[in-house]
Image (cartoon, rainbow, N blue to C red):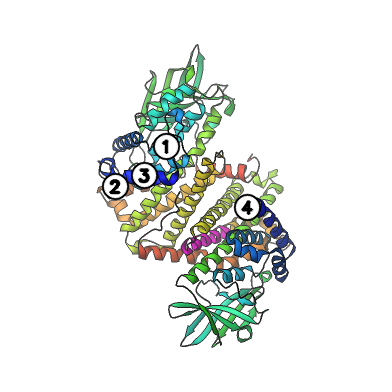
Amino acid sequence: MELDEYRASLDDWLERNTHVLTPDHDGIGTLDDQMAQLSKVKRLAFEAGWMRWGWPERVGGLGGSILLRAYLGEALTSRDLVEPGIYSMTEVLAPTMIDYAPLDLAASMVPKLLSGEETWCQGFSEPATGSNLAALSCRATRDGDVWRISGQKVWTSLAQYADRCVLLTRTGSSESAHTGITALFVDMGSPGITVRPIETMHGVPEFSEVFFDDVAVPLDRTLGEEGQGWSVAMDLLPFERSTALWHRVAYLHRRLQSLLDVAPAHLLDSVALGEVTQLLYALRARSRATQYRVAAGEKLGPETSIDKVLVASAEQAVFDLVGAGLGEEVIMGDDPSSDRWRREYLYSRAATIYGGTAEIQRNIIARRLLDLGSDR
Amino acid sequence: MDAADREIFKASLLHAVRGHTGSALDAALDDLGWHEALTLDAETAVSLLFEVQGTASASSSAIGEVLRFALGLDGHHKSDVVLPAFGRWETPGKIVDGSLSVRGLGIVSMGDRPRTLIAATVNDMVAVLDVMAADLVLRHVGGVDPRLGLVQVVGDGVPFNVLTELEPTGWSTAVGVSQLALGHELVGAARTMLELARQHALARIQFGKPISAFQSIRHRLADTLVGIETAESMLRAAWVDQSPVTAGMAKALAGRGARAAARHCQQVLAGIGFTTEHSFHHYVRRVFVLDQLFGTASALTGELGNQLLSSRQLMAMPPL
């Protein structure tokens, strides 16, 4: 299916099914509400076929360009039908499975993620391993036909809801850095896994600590080869900065419009408003070019760090404007709409931290795009 | 133009701007057929020339040619075209009670030809006027960037003939195309500043290592690249979009990005970049002026913000 046809038919479907797709909860809802809404929308969109376009047929997709996926995410987030952060995890995790899982595993698992039947999480960061991902120490040891995992992850989004986890483990020596990492696909129901949700500043237990105590994972759940985990991670990260980012821009545009709908003129600085708008449009233009590069089969690389720097700046700029234009609501309002603005404002403070900090993105730009050599 | 033709054309333009500036560059552009390219494929002709012109800090009359083309006055090759006044994007001419006053600028060729084209506002309409150059007061500007060849154009009670009246959106469309040209020139200048600073950072040794190893230097240069690529993305989108509003946004992003590049790269180049023995200062000067032509980044941004505050409606984003 071509993009124009997909766009027109999807818009029509969304229009006709507004009553079933609209969230039941008021305002932003709890994380439980948002997860229930996400599963519902994914299920309905999967059953109607929309969620299957843009994914390969061997994993239950209907084929077609990745642009179809980008448009679906845009259409859902810009209508406020799904929260963009949790929706976009599919865009990050499913491609990893498709590229690295054994064929039959990918074929049986990916449809569960696309259809909203399952939630997956991504076990990368550890207490001592934030920006310096290659230093991770969660240990996997071979024991007959299983891996035995012991260690800890943190900042694992949606771990308390997750059925599976794409987990990075240390399989080489402790000094092996990026060469001794292996990626595994772990059932979160396995004995020995403990999940402790952490409440964030914006009042949502979005991520968790995850403890692994001698957890057995079959060898055929290895993603890629032993020692190839770094490549798995490096190939996954650009997806956070392409399709996922495209969805976020659509969401930011919607929220900026919502701000314009209600904020009193004397509280909005015209230069700041103009600047945010310019940034958002430039980001949309850049992200659009990135979608087309992916669609043309190009492999994404360090240039997506520019997209990521831009989206983080744009998100904080939009919500800085919210903080000024709707200051009273953000600070004092107890109604659902104010609560939503407040949570979004607070969440935006993390935009320069998650998915690779602003500093890490600049390091990548300096080293890989400007060729400035080593920083040591 | 296909990709191969584009590369050849770009190489020729690069050769021209490296070897020539001012009226010599105007002549070189004539020889290259840049004017023909402008009428055949404006985006390619404008984006390529202005980016390389900015890269080399060369100067030509091309911005006047772009304005002439965008006003639909290709037939009037024998006239100079007056640009809006310093920092402005309104028409340089204004007719009140039948009397024409002119406050504008020209670059390089202004005054070389006997006749001048001036867009002028008459009540709510814009007309293009034919004016004798001898009836205007021209001042060749030295100022901050003497190599640019800027000319200040002033006139009061100037005799004129009306050549044509523009469509209601004619002037803003022409401003938009001119802003895109200047945006590409700003991006080109910023790219050279970044490259000069990058080379210096790699070569300059302090504390036993190149200063490029220090994160404060690396992050300044990374931010410079982000600013440049942001402007470039918006410029590309504005060509597709063809709206004067997005062109103004692109010019603002290019101006802001180039001003930031000047600030970051000056700091990285430090002492040597502050001397006339290094070429950096030419770019600082050029960017300072280009930001003003057809509206500064801050003025255009404030204008956009005010429009949004009154319309309360964001423009549609470029579709996927």
The image position of residue B186, as x and y in percent, is 59, 61
- Which chain hosts label 1? A
Q: Nearer the viewer, mark 2 or mark 4?
A: 4
From mark 4 to mark 1, how far is it between C-alphas?
32 Å
**Mark 1 packing: few (<14 Cα in 10 Å), some, or many (20+)?**
many
From mark 2 to mark 4, how far is it between C-alphas?
53 Å
Q: Do the residues under discs 3 and 1 have CB atoms within 8 angstroms?
A: no
From mark 2 to mark 1, how far is it between C-alphas?
35 Å
Instruction: State the mark number for residue A339.
Output: 2
Q: Do the residues under discs 2 and 3 have CB atoms within 8 angstroms?
A: no
The answer to which of marks 2 and 1 sits earlier in the sequence is 1
Q: Do the residues under discs 2 and 1 have CB atoms within 8 angstroms?
A: no
Above or below, A338 against B185 in this view is above
From mark 3 to mark 4, how far is it between C-alphas?
34 Å
Tell whether position B256 is magenta. Answer: yes
Q: Which residues are magenta?
A: B242-259
Residue at horizontal 67 percent and vertical 49 percent from the top: B201
The amino acid pointed to by label 2 is Asp
Q: Does A25 sit left or right of A282 as displayed?
A: left
Instruction: State the mark number for residue A272.
Output: none
Instruction: State the mark number for residue A9.
Output: 3
Point out the image quarter for the C terminus of chain A.
top right
* Magenta segment main secondary structure: helix
Find disc 1 in the rendering and name its residue: A53
What element does badge 1 sit on?
Answer: loop
The amino acid pointed to by label 3 is Ser
Q: Does A13 sit left or right of A57 as displayed?
A: left
